[in-house]
């Protein structure tokens, strides 16, 4: 007798994770790490949406390792993310955009995944209630490189051990995702079997599956670059940017859309097609975005959706980080659009 499919079948993130565990696509420890990340995102969503009410807008009055003014919510979101990961008991090392160095987690007792994250990307948009997001990537512990380091217990060797275990190429990512805090709270996740989209139902505080196996359009006439930097770009890039403004055969030039929040610009690109770019320029030789917890996770997601993530010449996922907060130029989105800019930059 066939099981009657209920017409109102809701798949929550929790049940979806348990199904993937049952299928053997993730293990029980990863299931718990991802569940703890989704809990952190729900807490951050609530903080972001009530920021003006709870006096969480504005600056903290400190500067982070990037030399950027830390917003109050940057600090709070980092604490929320770190605490959720630590209390999961399944993370060995965590590396945050907001922390100078990676943190070895003592609380771990079963499983020691490595989690890299930007707890609140685009936080300069917070005070104007424009979309922001959290970005994360998960690696397995890099045992061979841990073995390379002598077993002396001095602090700097432990710290060095953490840095080496975290600095892995995006090709090693086991899972990556982001949570976008916008008109809806959207949790996007890949565990290497395609891209899945969940929408937070505020009625009962669960992420509900709303899109499966998302495929990014092969092309799209939307570009997201900060053209305020045009004068500092190299000539090849200027020629590319100028070419987007010619009507061409279709008679229509590209449209510019720039939110100033990677997660918002990326999510629109993933669903509508097009390209997001943060190139190098005369002022920032390696661009602005960080390889480990921004470019690599987003590139894993876009490739799982049939798109492309490049530094202008090579796959982002092939780049081996040499330090935690390393920056790289990023061109990410529809295959045809990324290949077009790569041709101009060749
Ligand atoms: P700019 C936010 O600070 C961020 O890291 C990304 O989210 C965003 O796309 C970019 O920087 C915006 O930078 O220089 O255009 O303001």
Image (cartoon, rainbow, N blue to C red):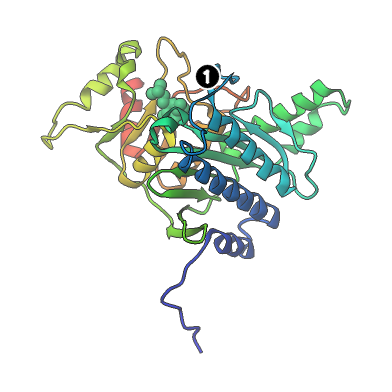
Residue placed most toward the observer, 133 or 322? 133
Q: Is residue 311 left or right of residue 253?
A: right
**Could you tell me residue 199's position as x and y percent?**
44, 54
How many residues crowd around disc 1 within 10 Å: few (fewer than 14), some, or many (20 or more)?
A: few
Residue placed most toward the observer, 201 or 161? 201
Q: Residue furthest right?
A: 152
Q: Decide: is 249 above or below 29.
A: above
Residue at horizontal 70%, vertical 27%? 163
**Could you tell me residue 33's position as x and y percent?**
65, 49
**Could you tell me residue 201's position as x and y percent?**
46, 58
Residue 259 in sight here: yes
Residue at horizontal 68%, vertical 25%? 101
SS class, disc 1: loop
**Could you tell me residue 301's position as x and y percent?**
47, 44
Residue 313 in sight here: no
Q: Is residue 100 left or right of residue 227?
A: right
Residue assigned mark 1: 68
Residue at horizontal 63%, vertical 22%? 323
Q: Quadrant of ligand 1?
A: top left
Residue at horizontal 53%, vertical 28%? 291
**Mark 1 beta carbon near ligand 1 (under 8 Å):** yes
């Amino acid at each position: 007798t066939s099981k009657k499919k209920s017409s109102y079948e809701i798949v929550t993130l929790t049940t979806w994770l348990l199904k993937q565990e049952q299928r053997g696509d993730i293990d029980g420890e990863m299931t718990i790490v991802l569940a703890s990340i989704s809990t952190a995102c729900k807490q951050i969503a609530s903080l972001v949406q009530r920021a003006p009410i709870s006096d969480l807008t504005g600056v903290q009055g400190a500067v982070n390792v990037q030399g950027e003014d830390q917003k109050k919510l940057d600090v709070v979101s980092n604490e929320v993310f770190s605490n959720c990961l630590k209390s999961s008991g399944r993370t060995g090392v965590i590396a945050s955009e907001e922390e100078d160095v990676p943190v070895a987690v003592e609380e771990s007792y079963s499983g020691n995944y490595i989690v890299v994250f930007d707890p609140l990307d685009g936080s300069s948009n917070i005070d104007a209630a424009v979309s922001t997001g959290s970005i994360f990537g998960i690696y397995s512990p890099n045992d061979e490189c841990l073995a390379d380091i002598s077993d002396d217990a001095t602090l700097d060797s432990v710290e060095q051990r953490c840095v080496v275990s975290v600095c892995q190429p995006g090709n090693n990512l086991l899972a990556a995702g982001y949570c976008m805090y916008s008109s809806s709270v959207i949790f996007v996740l890949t565990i290497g079997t395609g891209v899945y989209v969940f929408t937070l139902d505020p009625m009962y505080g669960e992420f509900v599956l709303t899109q499966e196996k998302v495929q990014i359009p092969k092309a799209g006439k939307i570009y997201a670059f900060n053209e305020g930097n045009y004068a500092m770009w190299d000539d090849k890039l200027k020629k590319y940017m100028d070419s987007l403004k010619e009507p061409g055969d279709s008679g229509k030039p590209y449209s510019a859309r720039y939110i100033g929040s990677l997660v918002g610009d990326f999510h629109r690109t993933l669903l509508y097609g097009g390209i997001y770019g943060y190139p190098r320029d005369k002022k920032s030789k390696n661009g602005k975005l960080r390889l480990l917890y921004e470019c690599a996770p987003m590139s894993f997601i876009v490739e799982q959706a049939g798109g492309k993530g490049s530094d202008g010449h090579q796959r982002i996922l092939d780049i081996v980080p040499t330090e935690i907060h390393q920056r790289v130029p990023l061109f990410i989105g529809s295959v045809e659009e990324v290949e077009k800019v790569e041709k101009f930059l060749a």
